[in-house]
Image (cartoon, rainbow, N blue to C red):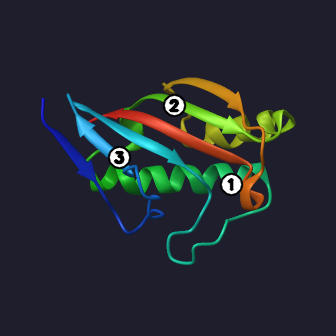
Amino acid sequence: MAKIIIKTDRAPKPLAGYSQAVKAGGLIFVSGQVPVDAATGEVVGTTIQEQTAQCLRNIEYILQAADSSLDKAVSATFILVEETDFAGMNEEWAKWFPIDPPARQGAKLPIRPKGIKISIALIAET
């Protein structure tokens, strides 16, 4: 099975040691995305809704670079810094996935890097 590394300048550049996404076996595996604007390198938003939207925007850009889209998402994992942000994250999530949302799993992140409240990784079909 061949794998293809997916890259786009529209999403934040990955740190050394991982790719924005990998396409293999008919799926696209998008690495965890944080709410950072690729153009400025700054965290976007102060609310969980704003930060969730930016994470999903970054994922959308990566999927577009892989010739896919959010409507082909099959699974997602989100990590929240504060468990109390779940309702707000879920509110924004529903706007992006109003019907047939992907399977989803969540976890709590024990630290808060640079004001980041959330990270989202996703798997989509090609």
Q: Disc 1 designates what residue?
A: 51
Label 2, on which residue?
Answer: 76
Three-letter amino acid code at disc 1? Gln
Q: In this picture, is 96 found above or below 108?
A: below
Residue sitting farthest toward the bottom: 40
Q: Position of residue 51 (x, y in %)?
A: 68, 54
The answer to which of marks 2 and 1 sits earlier in the sequence is 1
Q: Is residue 111 left or right of residue 3?
A: right
What residue is at 54 percent from the left and 36 percent from the top? Answer: 97
Q: Quadrant of the C terminus?
A: top left
Q: How many marks?
A: 3
Up-down: is 72 above or below 35?
A: above
Instruction: Categorize mark 3 by other alpha carbons within 10 Å: few (<14), some (14-19), many (20+).
Output: many
* Amino acid type, mark 3: Ala
Q: In the image, residue 72 lies at what x, y percent?
A: 36, 34
Of mark 3 and mark 1, the one earlier in the sequence is 3
The image quadrant that residue 14 belongs to is: bottom left
The answer to whether the residue labelled 3 contacts the one labelled 1, judged by CB atoms less than 8 Å apart, is no
